[in-house]
Amino acid sequence: MGSAAALYIPLITEQGTQGVLGICFNSTETQYDPERIQLLDAFCGLAALAINRIKLAEQARESSNHN
């Protein structure tokens, strides 16, 4: 049976940590490939911004409903 490894990358914005993305690898060969890590880090940055944008939109919607 092959080994599996995982990598956990925080989803961070200026407003703080929005969550964590966990990625499971089937092969330890590609687990720490620098190009792959750089791509995953960029993806996590975009995901964090998207999550934060949704939170801000929900807050704006809630505050407009209360006025």
Image (cartoon, grey):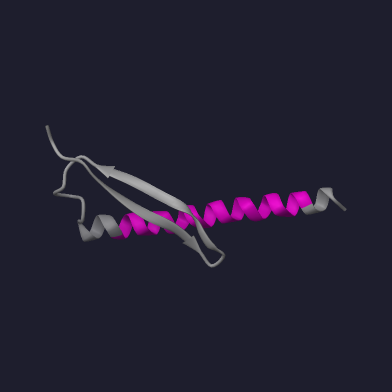
Examine the structure image and report whether residue 41 is included in the region drawn in magenta: yes
Q: Is the stretch drawn in magenta largely helix, strand or loop?
A: helix
Examine the structure image and report whether residue 19 is included in the region drawn in magenta: no
22 on left or right of 30: right
Which residue is at the far right?
A: 67
Q: Nearer the viewer, residue 39 or 56?
A: 56
Residue shown at 21% from the left, 56% from the top: 32
Which residue is at the far top?
A: 1
Residue shown at 24% from the left, 59% from the top: 35
The part of the chain drawn in magenta is: 38-62
Across and down, in percent, residue 43 comes to 40, 54
Q: Is residue 24 above or below residue 36?
A: above
27 on left or right of 46: left
Quadrant in the rendering for residue 27: top left
26 on left or right of 58: left
Q: Nearer the viewer, residue 46 or 2?
A: 2
Across and down, in percent, residue 22 comes to 36, 47
Residue shown at 82% from the left, 48% from the top: 65
Q: How many marks?
A: 0
Across and down, in percent, residue 21 comes to 40, 49
Residue shown at 43% from the left, 51% from the top: 20
Across and down, in percent, residue 58 comes to 69, 49
Position of the N terminus by quadrant = top left
Which residue is at the far bottom?
A: 14
